[in-house]
Image (spheres, grey):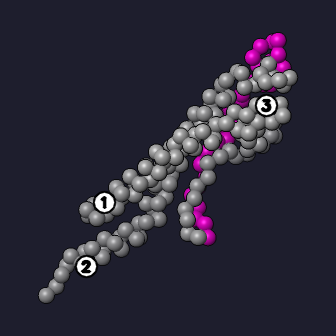
Amino acid sequence: MTFKAGDEYAMKLSKLAASSDEIAKKAIYSAADIVADEIKKNLVGNLRDPAYAGIGSYGKSKAGAWGGKASKPTGDLEESFGITPISQDEDGNWNVKIGFDGYDRKGVSNQLKARAMESGTSILRKRPFVRPAVNATKKKAVETMNEIIEQECKEIFDGR
């Protein structure tokens, strides 16, 4: 007597194991997109807020919202924002990083500028945009990863 169901199930498990890295990458990138979109939305809100540049003696002058030493946003910080390629650490975990890369046209590190906005400096009040975005999207990002993993597993087990 031969039971094909066990062999078929074993084949599907084998296919799932072979696809697990690609499924993980797809789920992680989808979640990263959700978080990155919210961070960028918050960043743009901060950059477009004329009151941000007008703190203390560094910023708003009698000339107007963008007077004094502050300058109108160039877009360098916004353009430097992105998601890194996915990588696997020594423990076998897949990771992506969301952040800022490079330097603006004046040679200032975009990471430094983002950190100054997030945490504040002696002359600029803090305007958090990363932490609120992560907090607001964490649940949705986890749910999205779960949905993708479940959908991919279902496709494999349903024979698609």
Residue bounds of the magenta highlight: 61-90
Residue 54 position, x and y percent, is 77, 22
Is 63 colored magenta in this rendering? yes
Q: Is residue 126 left or right of residue 18?
A: right
Q: Kindly identify the residue that appears in the image at 61 percent across and 48 percent down.
A: 98
Residue denoted by label 1: 154
Circle 2 SS class: helix
Confirm or deny contact between disc 3 and disc 1 (CB under 8 A). no
Residue denoted by label 3: 124
Q: Name the amino acid, label 2.
A: Asp
Is 65 colored magenta in this rendering? yes
In this rendered view, identify the residue nearer to me: 39 or 73: 39
Q: Main secondary structure of the magenta part?
A: loop
**In which quadrant is the C terminus drawn?**
bottom left
Residue 40 in view, yes or no: yes
The mark found on residue 15 in the picture is: none
The tag earlier along the polypeptide, 2 or 3, is 2
Return the residue found at the far left. Answer: 1
Give the vertical position of 62 relative to 131 (above or below). Answer: above
Q: CA distance from mark 3 to mark 1?
A: 51 Å
Give the vertical position of 114 relative to 48 (above or below). Answer: below
